[in-house]
Image (cartoon, grey):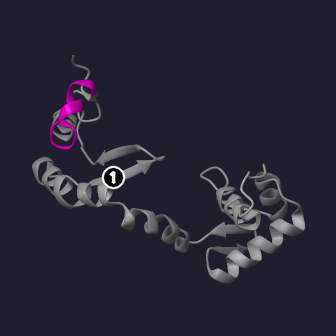
Amino acid sequence: MKQAARKDFVEAFARGLEVIKAFDELHPVLGISEVAERANLARPTAHRFLLTLEELGYVRSTPAGYMLTPKIVDLGMAYISSTRYLQACTNHAWNKLARELDQTCSLTQLGWQRCCVCCSCYGSQNNSFGSNCWRKTARILAPQWAHVLLGRS
């Protein structure tokens, strides 16, 4: 783990976040040694972080290793609930999109400035960008980008 330039940087907190980030789709259950390797920590240090996260309810121990619990979502929800942009999307445009498509819609933020629209549009043509589902989605949520999303100039 690289050192931060600021003197008030809390390295222990950063290490704890690295332990959490060690888990992913391909590694939903990890042993202590695996967490240590993926988080670039000594095994005893990784074990202490896992025990702390378990005590707080963010991970649980299984016979196969440790795994994240649903409580981990609370960390992301703090961000979502504090972001006006996402609230605006879910409140107005989202309701309009769901009504117009007559489908369930959701919003996912991918990284700091990228969002992904997920609509359950079924049918043989609905998975392509040129489908009616995508045209309506682009028109409602991103009219200024609709031509880009739909491949038109």
Image height of 42 relative to 59, above or below: above
Q: Nearer the viewer, residue 147 or 129?
A: 147
Q: Residue furthest left?
A: 100
Q: Position of residue 33 (x, y in %)?
A: 85, 60
Number of numbered discs visible in the structure rendering = 1
Residue at 72% in and 65% down: 10
Image height of 19 relative to 105, above or below: below
Q: Residue furthest front?
A: 7
Q: Residue furthest bottom?
A: 55
Q: Is residue 5 left or right of residue 76?
A: right
Q: Quadrant of the C terminus?
A: top left
According to the picture, the residue beneath numbered tag 1 turns out to be 107
Q: Quadrant of residue 48?
A: bottom right
Residue at 85% in and 68% down: 45
Q: Position of residue 49 (x, y in %)?
A: 76, 71
Image height of 49 relative to 118, above or below: below
Magenta stretch mostly in which secondary structure? helix
Q: Residues within 10 Å of mark 1 (few under 14, many from 20)?
A: some
Q: Is residue 145 left or right of residue 3?
A: left
Q: Secondary structure at mark 1?
A: strand
Q: Which residues are magenta?
A: 139-148
Q: Is residue 107 left or right of residue 131?
A: right
Q: Position of residue 101 (x, y in %)?
A: 14, 47
Residue at 22% in and 35% down: 134
Q: Is residue 117 magenta?
A: no
Q: Is residue 147 magenta?
A: yes
Q: Amino acid at mark 1?
A: Leu
Q: Is residue 56 left or right of residue 115?
A: right
Q: Residue furthest top?
A: 153
Q: Position of residue 129 (x, y in %)?
A: 27, 29
Image height of 131 relative to 113, above or below: above
